[in-house]
Image: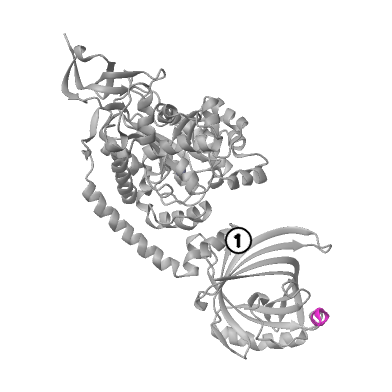
Amino acid sequence: MRTPCDVLLTHAHVLTMDDRWTVHAPGSVAVAGGTIVAVGDIDAEYAPVEAIDCGGRVVMPGLVNAHTHAAMTLLRGLADDLRLDVWLMGYMMPVERAFVRPEFVALGTKLACAEMIRSGTTCFADMYYFENMAAEAAAAAGMRALCGQTVLKFPAPDAASFEDSLSRAREFIARWKGHRLIAPAIAPHAPYTCTEEILRACAELAREYDVPLHTHLAETTFEVEQSRREHGMPVIPWVKKQHLFDARVLAAHCVHVDEGEMRALKEAGAGVAHNPTSNLKLGSGVAPVAKMLELGLAVGIGTDGPASNNDLDMFEEMRLAALLAKGVNGDPTTLPAREALAMATRNGARAVHLGDLTGSLEPGKRADLIVIDLDQIHNMPRFERDPGGVYSQIVYAGKSTDVLDVMCDGRWLMRDRKLLTLDEGDLHAAAGDVARRIDLFLIEREQSVLQKLIAIGGATEGESFEVQVKARLVSADDVRRGLESDLITVIRAVHYHQFDTYFFFDDPNQGRLRYREDEFLDEQENVVGARARLTLTGPAREAAFGSVLLFRSRFFAPATHSPRFYREYFKPAREGEVEKDRHRWLVAFRGVQFYVHLDRMLSPRAGAHFLEVKSRTWSRRDAQDKAAVIVELLELLGARPDEAIEEGYVEL
Ligand SMILES: [Zn+2]
């Protein structure tokens, strides 16, 4: 009496990828109710509804992409060859804020699912916004996914605040918990985009619902150095201190971790997603995966988002993982093909905390499997001597296009390279429409320095105007004496050391961007505080108030990045640097408040003194009135206006 089953795959070269590396060649796999019921020499025992003769082709577990941002297929190729912060803060996040809506995530995830199914992936660990839509798209496409709802300290496309994103995550988890294909997770983006409070709250929520926590850890040296500077310790111990490891963590990257940190990850039961292409492309480095594997850590392989890879091809990824490990260790025996394939299957499933469901072909696990044709011209001939040869055939010569059939949870998603759950033609057209809209948005933005400043969250104070006049001084003492005049009331006096970097653009209408670092000095010239800010100064609107007074528009923004970031983001045509010692007085004169700046140049023109007097203004009329007063004030301070002095006293 044969046991009924849904599908019986026969005459296959079955790679179970179980703990004992069991291979059945030939062998069969029986599937019933979405689950694998038997593997091996079982043909006589089962009566299938659908029997498939595999003709000696490889049947193995579907690949597990341990870390991605699936919907970012729609941002693929948008901005490449940039540093991580410029890429992320300058391009990805602003475009995401403008475009990422529920429909965007639905479409982008469908596109990703089509690509993943075509390349033999049946399970992926995702992290994005509107993750409900990602989960729906994955489930409709029939794929298994660990879906992480992103939580950030910044306003995100789907949440105005961290509290909003946390409650969104809670609803998301409650909705999907227990789903057959979708495992919900919470995804605090990274330690540097979250606060201590956010990390703790996320870990707590993950524990409350017993779901994994998906995050990025120790991706760049910059991140690690910043953690050391701000918290006095590297990333892993710091997040441990925030109780992150109370949750079941999936940590993407872990490029810059030492052995102690790897042990801490292991002890915490955390999984690691190794993303070799993304780490290379963004210049982040190479994760010490050989050491991680030696310590017994669960390490999977991920593509990362298609905006930083730029594809979702796990065949490329596992080959690169194997080759890189050999290259950086100077040892070709490091990370053999079989181990790399295990990282893309069994170990990847463990890393994403779905190891009890998928990752190997064993009775009781879900029927997530692929059929591969290894008899293509690029993979011939086939040797029988070494039974392990099949692993190197797949890893070193196999291509994603060799995948013929894909089954997930017992359902066929692709047969003979034809997708069964998604329409590629529709996806192609819809993705093209999105690309055209994003192109227009960026073309417009890239033409304006101000628009670019606004895009990175700058220019929060809006536009303001000022009248100003500058003078070259023979003696600074005249100014100090002048300030003692009965006609002038000194309201406030400050002393600081200023470092300015000026960015100039070819089009003068763009204005000038200044990155300024101020060090506040006390009376003994000790540094008592510091701040950095950006000012975008528009071209002089009027020069008609006398011959020298300018009426300019200015936008201020806090400078939260380094000058290097702004240089790479704004791409100025020229730069100038100025260092000076500044005494600044806020004074009242003839009923008007003015700022008086007495500057001693340190570089360039060391030793030269300049005087600058300025006042905020609101209208042309007001500027005109103040222009008359400002000349009078300047004379009282012993100086005459000098129109030849340029902004920042830089020779242009
Ligand atoms: Zn990522």
Q: Quadrant of residue 527?
A: bottom right
Which residue lies at the image location 32% right of the left edge and 31% below the top edge?
181
Task: Give the percent coordinates (x, y) of residue 254.
Answer: 53, 38
Q: Is residue 582 left or right of residue 258?
A: right
Residue at image location 71% in from the left, 88% down from the top: 632
**Secondary structure type for disc 1:** helix
Could you say which is closer to the camera, residue 331 or residue 495?
Answer: 331
Q: Tag 1: Cα neighbours inside 10 Å, few (<14), some, or many (≥20)?
A: many
Q: Give the position of the N terminus as an image quadrant.
A: top left
- Quadrant (top left, top right, bottom left, bottom right) of the C terminus: bottom right
Count of numbered marks = 1
Q: Is residue 334 above or below residue 84?
A: above
Residue at label 1? 563
Residue type at numbered disc 1: Pro
The location of residue 598, given as percent across then percent down, is 75, 75
Q: Residue at x 59, y 68 (%)?
A: 535
